[in-house]
Image: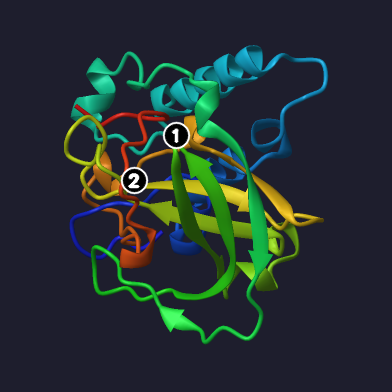
Amino acid sequence: MDKAGPMGRPYFLYLLSLASNLSCMKYLIFLFSPFLLQAQDTLSYWEEMQQHRDHLNQEFATPEKSPLTEEDLAVFDSLDFYPVDTQYRIVARFIRTPGEKPFEMATSTSRKPVYEKYGEAHFKLKGKSLVLNIYQNHRLRKMKDYKDYLFLPFKDFTNGHGSYGGGRFLDLQIPSGNTIVIDFNKAYNPLCAYNERYSCPIPPEENHLQTAIEAGVKADH
């Protein structure tokens, strides 16, 4: 991760795209593990989500892996989550958008990682038809272990009113068909929500949802 300027880095992939130190890389690998990104057949969805949250809390509580400052780590007990709500686990229609022009995604610092729009997720939520752009990081797609990684940054009406004001992220994988699971219960904060030393992507305006996503990780404090 870049350490330029005071602000942070998001969960997993976004982290990888910024990761420049070993502890951040380990954090990203943890978050992107198939165990966390895919429900195991032997687990119910609720059990999967509990394990997902337990692992996140364990990472945050471990000094060698935690993005927290020393002061916050000393009093850390648990991340604050919205209740698990299955309406926010959505099987969206996936539309591939080949030939998109690469662009530099704005961040909380001067860093400008190169992304490319990979596709669109079309879905309905609370009676509204919504679309989110899904991106691929140019650096990560050259890495064998992360060539299938996709990044979904978004903002919604909860930002600054329950969730982190700078938006939240989801980590995805390239789907094999024309659907993709968007599980907002796994939405996480940029690392800059916890520590100023990180550099975080800023969700593009086209991914500002005109609805409240009351799911996933809440604001830091």
Element type where label 2 sits in the image? helix
Q: Give the image location of residue 32, x and y in percent.
A: 62, 44
Taking 138 as reference, is 102 above or below it?
below
Which of the two residues, 136 or 122, is positioned nearer the viewer here? 122
Horizontal side of residue 192 vs 186, given as left or right: left
Q: Residue drawn 64% across and 12% down?
A: 47
Labelled disc at residue 64: 1
Q: Nearer the viewer, mark 1 or mark 2?
A: 2
Taking 180 as reference, is 30 above or below it?
above
Labelled disc at residue 110: none
Residue kind at label 2, given as amino acid type? Leu
- Who comes first in sequence, dot 1 or dot 2? 1
Q: Give the image location of residue 143, x and y in percent.
A: 69, 67
Q: Residue drawn 44% across and 21% down?
A: 57
Image quadrant of residue 216? top left
Residue kind at label 1, given as amino acid type? Glu
Q: Give the image location of residue 160, x and y in percent.
A: 17, 39
Q: Give the image location of residue 127, x and y in percent.
A: 44, 38
Taking 130 as reference, is 184 above or below it?
above
Q: Residues within 10 Å of mark 1 (few under 14, many from 20)?
A: few
Q: Residue drawn 25% across and 19% down?
A: 74
Horizontal side of residue 78 vs 129, given as left or right: left
Element type where label 1 sits in the image? loop
Labelled disc at residue 191: 2
Where does the C terminus fall, quadrant-wise? Answer: top left
Which of the two residues, 39 or 92, is positioned nearer the viewer here? 92
